[in-house]
Image (cartoon, helix red, strand yellow):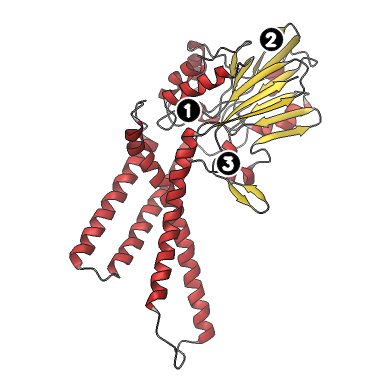
Amino acid sequence: MGPSLTFGTLRFIVVSLAVFAQIYLFLRFRQSVRSSGRSQRVKSAALVLAGSVIGLLFAMNLFILIRPVAWVDPPAPVQALLFYLPAVWGFGSILSALLLAVFQAAGGLARVIAGRIRGPAPREGEPPEDPGRRLFLQAGVGAVAAAPLFLSGYGAAWAGRSHEVCELTLPFGVPLRVVQLTDHHAGVYMTRNDLRRYAEAVSALDPDLFALTGDFVSNSIAFLPGCLEEMSRVRARYGTFATLGNHEHWVASPDRLRSLFRQHGVPLLYNAHRVIRTARGPFAVAGIDDMRIGNDDLDAALKGLDPSTPTILLSHRPEIFPEAAAQGIALTLSGHYHGGQIQLSLPGGTTSLAHLRTPYPEGLFRIGESRLYVSRGIGTTFTPVRLGARPEITVINLT
């Protein structure tokens, strides 16, 4: 188990970026207002209004991030106003501030270089600055600042309402229909009604096995019981099995987590396995704890298991795959990275923070006869925004 950032550290980084963004954007807005030709009264009113709106949205977003509210399912307009609008502003304002800061630095550098080339004195006969050009540049800066906010709003709507079913067929040795859900991140952006809709969608797929690969909550244990209750609605032919993610360890002890899973009838494979016998032969489902925050032990999970038994390994993080392949495990199911959550499509292919961090950001991988599938999951972390990485229900038809 290697070193890892704690949830508190990640939250501090996000909050620090958000504070910088609010201050920077307000200062840029104040500079723009002061240079306008409006009356002093209008300027003062604009600054007070902007400061109040920015402060209110930031405070609401901060409250949700640090002090998660009790689980509620308000009407959609109320949910959008109270939860999604502050979150969209929080994420979009960070991107806007960073983009504007980069443009400001680049512009300053360009002026310095131009000044060195031309010299300090203006050239003789040089025309005065064109007012139309200044307005054009101001409009361009405004578009740069607004674009991330519009993208954030689009990504929030997309993340909450547009999942896809990814279905594939793989060799295994025992015919089996497996449905995987991962990275629920239950909370104000993944409500109990949302989870119920996902449970109903999974049930409609008629699974033989229902696999849950961690990160059931985001930042509060209070959301775990309801999440487990909704997942337990699914009736898979050979049962439901789960493993823990890093977020569970951030909000509760392993003993507390195991107790909650038992209470709600969801079998938790904590460095353990189960052998299931079918008319077409036996197979095993194994699960390990989170590799960075938890106490993963693949050897303990496989202890006593006949190596010839086709095995599915549930691991929240996919980096276990080389070790699992060396152990002869036929299929490993993972999540964790959300497919990057926010992807950029570039000429050389798709990229995201996840694609830069791991060789297994999403999709199907193979080592020898062993296979790994990494799902994008259904929830979000820190901001309810997905771009280019749709929420996913995975269906794997094993043969």
Label 3 is placed on what type of residue? Gly
Rendered residue at 74%/6% (across/down):
279
**Image spot of residue 232 (x, y percent):** 51, 14
- Estimate the spatial distance between the alpha carbons at disc 2 and disc 1, rounded to whole Å: 28 Å
Mark 3 or mark 1, earlier in chain = 1
Label 1 is placed on what type of residue? Val
- Estimate the spatial distance between the alpha carbons at disc 3 and disc 2, rounded to whole Å: 34 Å
Mark 3 neighbour class, 10 Å CA radius: few under 14, some 14 to 19, many 20 or more: many
Residue assigned mark 3: 340
Mark 1 neighbour class, 10 Å CA radius: few under 14, some 14 to 19, many 20 or more: many
Residue assigned mark 2: 276
Q: Is residue 154 above or below residue 29?
A: above
**Image spot of residue 150 (x, y percent):** 43, 49
Secondary element at image label 2: strand
Q: Is 344 placed left or right of 313 in the picture?
A: left
Q: Which of the 4 quarters of the picture holds residue 145?
A: bottom left
Q: Is 370 placed left or right of 209 in the picture?
A: right
Label 2 is placed on what type of residue? Ile
